[in-house]
Image (cartoon, rainbow, N blue to C red):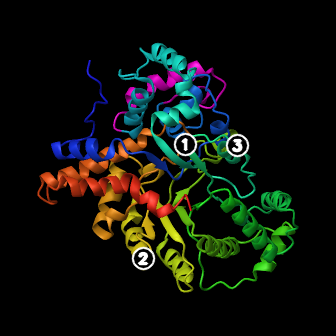
Amino acid sequence: MSSFIHDDFLLQTDFAKRLYHNFAKELPIIDYHNHLSPEDIATNRQFDNCSQVWLSGDHYKWRAMRALGINEKYITGNATDEEKFHKWASAVPYTLRNPLYHWTHLELERYFGVKELLTENNATATYEKTNDLLQQSSHSTLGLLKQQNVELLCTTDDPIDSLKYHNSIKSQALSPKVLPTFRPDKAFGVGDAVSYNVYLSQLEEVTGNSINDYDALLVALENRVDYFHQNGCRLADYGLEQIYHSTTADFNLDTLFQEVRNGKQLSVAQVQYFAGKVMLELSKMYHKRGWAQQFHVGAIRNNNKRLLTQLGPDTGFDSIGDFSHAVSISGYLNELDSTDQLAKTIIYNLNPADNEMIATMVGNFNDGTIRGKVQYGAAWWFLDQKDGMEKQLNTLSSLGVLSTFVGMLTDSRSFLSFPRHEYFRRILCNLLGNDVVNGELPEDEQWLGKIVSDICYHNAVNYFEFDN
């Protein structure tokens, strides 16, 4: 039986095939945003079985399994790893037209050479084959990354992180290069005074200084920005409902800080005001050091309170939100730009209704100093599937400059997720190939091939300047 995932998967025209195979397929991967474990990389972890590396922590799969009526025991519960794998295998045929169907078979073939479609009938054989390979050095964490030609990746790290595993990776001269990303969301998370005060105690410990007022908080954060910079960090990242910015509220920041320190619950307006002000100061720190900042906006998280209580956060109960962003994003970027302190910026939106708004908003702040300085980011989370990627690429093409795009990322916790770069590259080449066939682009293989290779690799190299 021929493989479902064949050489020309998703490539509908001869021109698309040439673009992909000649200009995209062999390029290294720069995965500038993911949630992989630096410890797993530093220790070159060998996973015991396929469920550990493939199903654990994957809320995409968990949501699908719940929708198919599979008991939580086989998802996040106390079933054995093998039982969980069998349940996922039984679910896969019913995920057709969901990106999970493509990802599942792409990952099985690329990492394990499994060409058969996964079903309950071949689950045992597939589980045994993948487990046998996972015991080999070729399928350790470093081996898995090498298989996919990963050149560099950036993890997502809290300001209080010691970065000891990043330092271990560097001291061992391991490949790929692994750099931290500064994720300071907890540093302005004053919506929960108890959790915030616990966090500040941890921040005090790592900086060695008391944080008794607002100015001391900023000093502590700059201390950590410097520490991250010294350890190769060139990126910051946020996961937010919205970018917070207010031109009407006028609270005293130190008063708000002291109230939180005393355990007082702030109003929503006060929480957002405080967060926005801290973020602005952080953005200035990033600009000073030549970093890029990433904003992931639009998720409404932890919707199912009953299951949140049982299972905790990040277990598959988040969704697309319908926030009003335009005024606040404009105000935030404009305030930084007005003093020439706007860092390189990437904005990812989760609601496709915001595609055109984000794509046009970023264009307001490209000032000719840096190629693609402010970017409309890759299709993210619920949108990082074929339809979502095509919509993002089409919107960026129509309202911005596609050729400056820094390309795809995994945003994943799984070491088996890197074929998503291949998925994106195929979709990009197919889109351009169709334009050529339709007479909407010239049949200039070398020029379009250069644009493809820039988007898939070279733009990220030049934009992030990781070696500086």
Q: Which mark is residue 366?
A: 2
Mark 2 or mark 3: name the one nearer the start of the chain: 3
* Residue 80 falls inside the magenta stretch: yes
Amino acid tagged 2: Asn
Secondary structure type for disc 2: loop
Query: Is 304 located above or below residue 255 in the figure?
Result: above
The residue at which mark 1 appears reads as 176
Query: Is 8 located above or below residue 328 in the figure?
Result: above
How many residues crowd around disc 2 within 10 Å: few (fewer than 14), some, or many (20 or more)?
some
Q: Residue at x 48, y 46 (%)?
A: 410
- Mark 1 → mark 2, Cα distance in angstroms: 32 Å
Quadrant where the N terminus lies? top left
Amino acid tagged 3: Ser
Amino acid tagged 1: Pro
Mark 1 or mark 3: name the one nearer the start of the chain: 3
Q: Decide if residue 192 is on the left or right side of residue 263.
A: left
Chain part drawn in magenta: 69-97
Q: Decide if residue 286 is on the left or right side of residue 363.
A: right
Residue 40 falls in which quadrant of the image? top right
Q: Main secondary structure of the magenta part?
A: helix
Query: Is 333 located above or below residue 155 in the figure?
Result: below
The residue at which mark 3 appears reads as 168
- Looking at the rendered image, the disc whose residue lies closer to the viewer, 2 or 3, is 3
Residue 9 falls in which quadrant of the image? top left
Query: Is 289 located above or below residue 68 in the figure?
Result: below
How many residues crowd around disc 3 within 10 Å: few (fewer than 14), some, or many (20 or more)?
some
Secondary structure type for disc 3: helix
- Mark 1 → mark 3, Cα distance in angstroms: 13 Å
Secondary structure type for disc 1: loop
Mark 1 or mark 2: name the one nearer the start of the chain: 1
How many residues crowd around disc 1 within 10 Å: few (fewer than 14), some, or many (20 or more)?
some
